[in-house]
Amino acid sequence: MVVGLVEAAVGLRLAVLGVRRMKPEDVSRRAAASDAYHRQLDGSSRSVAYYERRTRSIAIITLTVGVVFTLSALVLLFLALFN
């Protein structure tokens, strides 16, 4: 039962984090920071659009993992209560 609750909390936290990372202003800010970091690090000149796509992909993956964790936690809680 405790494992289900902890897993649900982690899943919800990841889902919220994924949603926050998909906000347009957050995506733009992260992309600009990544671009500046890589230019300073090795002089690479990838476009900011590349970093925006990458940031959105990471956000979608984070959101998906969060939803899967939450759903599996609900199944664990259901089994713990009714078994």
Image (cartoon, rainbow, N blue to C red):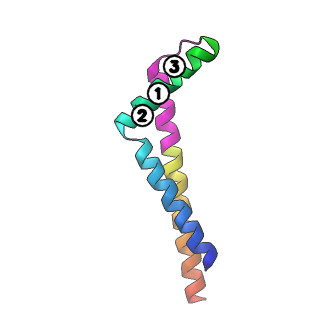
Q: Amino acid at mark 1?
A: Ala
In the picture, which quadrant includes the N terminus? bottom right
Q: Is residue 42 magenta?
A: no
**Residue topped by disc 1:** 31
Closest to the observer, 34 or 58: 34
Q: Residue at x 56, y 70 (%)?
A: 73
Q: Residues within 10 Å of mark 1 (few under 14, many from 20)?
A: many
Q: Residue at x 53, y 66 (%)?
A: 9
Q: Amino acid at mark 3?
A: Ala
Check whether the beta carbons of the residues at disc 1 and disc 3 lie within 8 A of each other: no
Q: Amino acid at mark 2?
A: Val
**Residue topped by disc 2:** 27
**Residue topped by disc 3:** 36
Mark 1 vs 3, N-terminal side: 1
Magenta range is 44-59
Residue 11 drawn at (x, y percent)? 53, 61
Q: Quadrant of residue 28?
A: top left
6 sits to left or right of 24? right
